[in-house]
Image (spheres, rainbow, N blue to C red):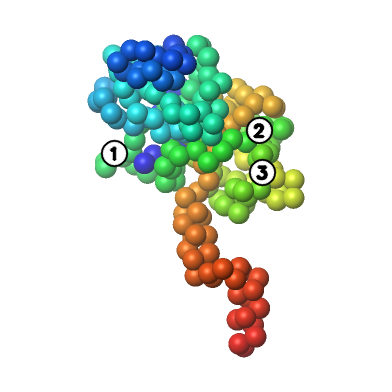
Amino acid sequence: MFTGIVEYMGTISAVSENDTTESGGNGWTVTVGDASCILDDCHIGDSIAINGTCLTVTEFSQDTFKVGMAPETLRKTNLGELKVGSKVNLERAMSANKRFGGHMVQGHVDDTATIIDITPEGNSLWFKLQLPTTALLPYIIPKGFICLDGASLTVCDVNDAERWFTIMMIAHTQSCVVMADKKPGDRVNVEVDMVGKYALKSLEGAMGSEGIEALVKRLLAKQ
């Protein structure tokens, strides 16, 4: 579990599509360098979120750590686009004594969104992002939580018909996350608020197979 408060921006030092070392397991691995500030309490098997994706540490040193990526992770996220030198958002799993400044983030990326516009206003930036399908839109509401590349942010506007939403990023956040350096056309990892997922799932279970419209009609008829 994470908070969506990015601790540090590390730098990709190695990418291997077929890592044959013991810690690589013949799979896709990424090594993050310049990360000593978050490795003082690191252990093999720990969870660290990279751009909002919960990943398992398989090897680490004083300054670097390695993680493996499953095919599903590469399909659902933008991590397959990482190259040596890429900056990434890093957050360790939440500890019991950590101040909870963001929102409950699982590190389970739902999909990616594409930045379609970036507009300055004062010292802040408006980001307009478009989703590939409508599947996540029921969970994205104005002033609701959303996690983008691992950063907890607030949704401003939502357009269901055109599948886009906006967020506004203050100057401080711009200096702490990788999204501020992205451009229109770049993809961003998206995790919607899990509370919304559970709420909708519970509602669907209560409605059964009839759907919300039929349920409303039946309740009105009873009245």
| Residue behind mark 3 | 133
| Residue behind mark 1 | 95
Mark 2 in CB contact with mark 1 (< 8 angstroms):
no
Q: In the rendered view, would you say 86 is above or below 155?
A: above
The three-letter code of the residue at mark 1 reads Ser
**Outermost residue toward the right in this view:** 162
| Residue behind mark 2 | 114
The three-letter code of the residue at mark 3 reads Thr
Q: 63 or 205: which is nearer to us?
A: 205
Can you tell which quarter of the image residue 40 is in?
A: top left
N-terminal-most mark, 2 or 3: 2
- For the question of whether residue 107 can be seen, the reply is yes
Q: Residue at x 53, y 14 (%)?
A: 83
Q: Which mark is residue 170?
A: none
In the rendered view, does 90 fall on the left or right side of 87? left
Q: Horizontal and vertical percent for residue 8?
A: 42, 24
Q: Residue at x 47, y 16 (%)?
A: 17
Q: Horizontal and vertical percent for residue 44?
A: 26, 25
- Identify the secondary structure beneath mark 1: loop
Q: 89 or 188: which is nearer to us?
A: 188
Q: Horizontal and vertical percent for residue 114?
A: 66, 33
Q: Residue at x 67, y 32 (%)?
A: 115
- Identify the secondary structure beneath mark 3: loop
Q: Which is in the foreground here, disc 3 or disc 1?
A: 3
The three-letter code of the residue at mark 2 reads Thr
N-terminal-most mark, 3 or 1: 1
Can you tell which quarter of the image residue 41 is in?
A: top left
Q: In the rendered view, would you say 176 is above or below 62?
A: below
In the rendered view, does 46 fall on the left or right side of 129? left
Q: Quadrant of the C terminus?
A: bottom right
- For the question of whether residue 66 can be seen, the reply is no
Q: Quadrant of the N terminus?
A: top left
